[in-house]
Image (cartoon, rainbow, N blue to C red):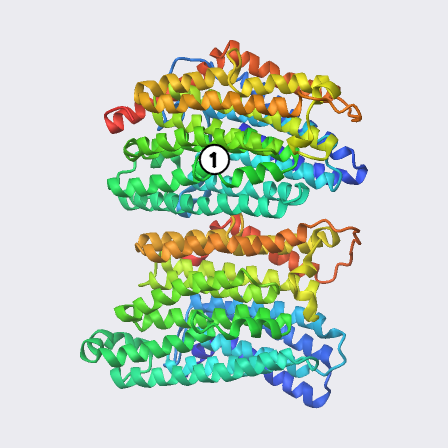
Amino acid sequence: MNLSQMQALMPLLILSLTAVALMIQASIKPDQAVAWVITAIGLVLTIWGANYARDYSQSVTILLDVDPWGLFFSSLMVVAALVTLILSRDSFANEGQRKEEYYLLLVLSLLGALVLIQSSHMVSLLLGMELMGVALYVMIAFPEKGELPVEAAIKYLVLSACASAILLYGFALLYAATGELSYAGLGAKAGAAYAQNPLLIMAGTGMVISGIGFKLSLVPFHMWTPDVYQGAPTPVTGFLATVSKGAVFVALTRMYLDGQLYQYPSLISALVVIAIASMLIGNLLALRQNNIKRLLAYSSIAHFGYLLVVLIALTGKGLASDAVTYYLTAYVVTSLAAFAVIARVSGEDATQCQISAYEGLFWRDKFQATCLTVALLSLAGIPLTAGFIGKFYVITVGLQSSLWALLAAVVVGSAIAIYYYLRIIFAMSKVPAETVEQSGYSGRVLALLLTLLVLALGSWPEPFINYATSL
Amino acid sequence: MLMINLILILLVGGLLAMLSERFGSQVPRRVALAVVLIDLAYLLVSLSGLPELTGLQATVPGDPQTWLMHYRAEWIPAFGISFEFALDGISLMMVLLTLVLGAVAVSSSWTDVTIKRGFFEANLLWTLAGVLGVFMALDLFLFFLFWEVMLIPMYFLIAIWGHEQRAYAAMKFFIFTQASGLLMLVSVLCLATIHQGNTGIWSFSYFDLLNTQMAAQTAYWLMLGFFVAFVVKLPGFPFHTWLPDAHTQAPTAGSVILAGVLLKTGAYGLIRFAVPLFPQASMEFAPIALWLGAAGVVYGAVLAFAQTDFKRLIAYSSVSHMGFVLLGVYAWNQLALQGAVMQMVAHGFSTAALFMIAGSLQERLHTRDMREMGGLWHNMPRMGAVAMFFIVASLGLPGLGNFVAEFLVLLGLFQVDRWLTVVAALGLITGAAYSLLLMQRSFQGEPDESRQLTDFGTREMLTMALMMVALIVLGLYPQPVLDMAQPVLEGLLQFSLTVTGGPL
């Protein structure tokens, strides 16, 4: 390993150092405020590091592949972690518990996500996924009060462990068929191996998709999602929805492209079924939810269904890979905006997450209600928001590849989705008997910035489109 | 720039109206009225600089130079999306109608909105801005944007200030239009993708996409995507079910905008996009569309006859009247198209006025149920007379705008399909039946002396007089409107003739 390779790993190194610094600080003088500052500085430096590493893009050993595309997503995930960090301070602030560890876990989980994003080998994929996951179990269970977080954490832990085992078995089968564990090696031997041993490849890729599908909560591996979303503290839910799912999807995309998984027709058919099921079932189940976090859980299932449409159309650089970049970015930013408002409005009180708690929010707190409305409209894919350009990409990519069944599911799914997003907006617009204007500016800057970003991505997308194309 | 300014004035004006609430709850409505009137004045002043409006030269659909106005600026060059606006006779007419009815809508909600006045007027102005965008945008992406975005303020108008069942009605309205809009989005994107495949260039401009070569079957499917979106908005049978709910539950100003302007976006879309973009496919589809139109005329009339709710009756009568527009468009000849355009304008005025009367009744009686009305002429003679005027206008009394429109449509349709004309003409008879029933049940009959009702005041009478004059002018001297639409229709007919080689 030479110097330029170390420079390419800059974001990972900075993040690891942040983790070390946090551990040392905790052993010398545990102080939550200091830990928060160290984490914040570490994250900001990581963003700088990701930018710095762009000039040194290369493969670092066989395990990691540092490229501008991955580095962009690394920065995006760090930004999401920063948002989580800011939200976490407020939501834990009034509880007299020790939580230096929480920040350490956040950094470790993020480190796992960055490894996952840059992985070019099944070993690094698994390492990243486990690091990210194990830290997340604890983060979900972190609040000392209430049973829901513990329940959610155990559910996630048990199911996640099963998924990892299946994933590992899938890797083993692929290794048996091809003798390769790196994506590139897998891709090179894909055609020959399939001709020789189609069953083994089918079983292997099937298991890999099941394992990854669990993390992305695609139907039929979605059962855990609503409970975990509901049980986890709101900032952690936001982290799970954006960083964890986003990083796994980036890893999946890389594996799909480099491993040339698109060469396997049986896998494509399986993905088509999973995508259609996710779009329809995710949206249908969201209809009956009264808890806003559960509702967003089901909506995220549908959104990853839309993303799968793009993945299925993916065969290399081009419109489809831009679509992944754009859609994922739009989804992450929009979700963060939504969770930023929910963390503010609902706090950690479980009853406050009911849609009924949002009634009249427009008149109580115009600002938060407007931000949430923009976020919901973006999730629904209404023009002028980031979500619409995302949908624009999904449909265009689907059209270019003539994926008619999937397009039909996108249209039907989006039509269903409007109902439940509008339900929240309607609840917020209800005029209450008496209005108590709430003021206070805490946390508004964050929600405002994210909302503006959603609107900017949707109404002036040209700069970002060009940037995504250049990656 | 004029076209962008028109929209911007309304957008900024909406914001001002919302903020002005802090100076008193009576201020927003004045601001809103001023904004609409300024916008209208600005348009009229700028029009004097235009080339002769009633020139004989045809507007060529594919050549922006022959249009009255054309503006284009880059927006998302990566996909060839631009801020492209253009104005021809028909869009100009629709823009004028929108602004005039916008002022009427503000006036109609002068007293009946009690909560959150600022936000109400803002939503009203933003809806108008969206509608203007729909009528002027000639980039399909931009058009779709306005098409969708105008739903949001309209949704709020119904959901916040609507009547008893507003949640249901607002949701139904939004889902119907949005879901059908998605089909149009897929069609738009597919059209652009095909164009990109043919030429290698991304473009969403109407002028570029107009002559896109594609397989006949593809064109048919794409045409259906547009058709469904527009017919839902029109609304045409069998996609009309959202309309009675939305119209009935919306506040008065919302109903005025919905019936007067929003429905016309569907008709405009058919004339501007659905047929010219896919002339061949539309030609094959025309018989079905004509039957749907005739079915709408009769079905809407029959249902209107059975209503007891004042607003619901007018809503169903809209279904019937918009059936004539569908007939006029798909008959696709000069006479029928002129009739369709005339119907868009005349129906805008007559229905807006009727909804305003319905709103006034609701404000005074707190009911829309006609069984609880009767003899109102005695209590409110001025309102009675006004209602009589608009009811006979709506049933198609010769001498008023609606008659000219429906007569032209039937005349044009006769050249295409004789028997269908007979069916559609039935709508005129049933129209007379339900309209007169409306009059009898509410304003005639035994008066209730115990009622203390205030008659129309100066503000209401002024607004009504404006629309009466409009309908009388349209009925007695329709030539200016016909002249305005003439070059556009001429161009469209010639265009479709060269593409399909025969009449639609």
Left or right of B127? Residue B236 is: left
Tell me residue A84's x, y (percent).
62, 70
Tell me residue A221's x, y (percent).
44, 74
Report in which chain the residue with disc 1 lies: B
Q: Is residue A120 above or below residue A176?
A: above
Q: Is residue A385 above or below residue A164?
A: above
Tell me residue A312's x, y (percent).
34, 63
Tell me residue B455's x, y (percent).
75, 21
- Amino acid type shown at disc 1: Pro
Q: Residue at x 49, y 55 (%)?
A: A416
Q: Quadrant of the N terminus of chain A?
A: bottom left
Q: How many marks?
A: 1
B50 or A328, nearer to the observer: A328
B243 or A147, nearer to the observer: B243
Residue B284 visible in rendering: yes
For label 1, the residue is: B235
Task: Name the residue at the top extreme.
Answer: B476
Q: Is residue A257 above or below residue B101?
A: below
Disc 1: CA contacts within 10 A as few (<14), some (14-19) or many (>=20): many
Q: Secondary structure at mark 1?
A: loop
Q: Residue at x 27, y 70 (%)?
A: A266
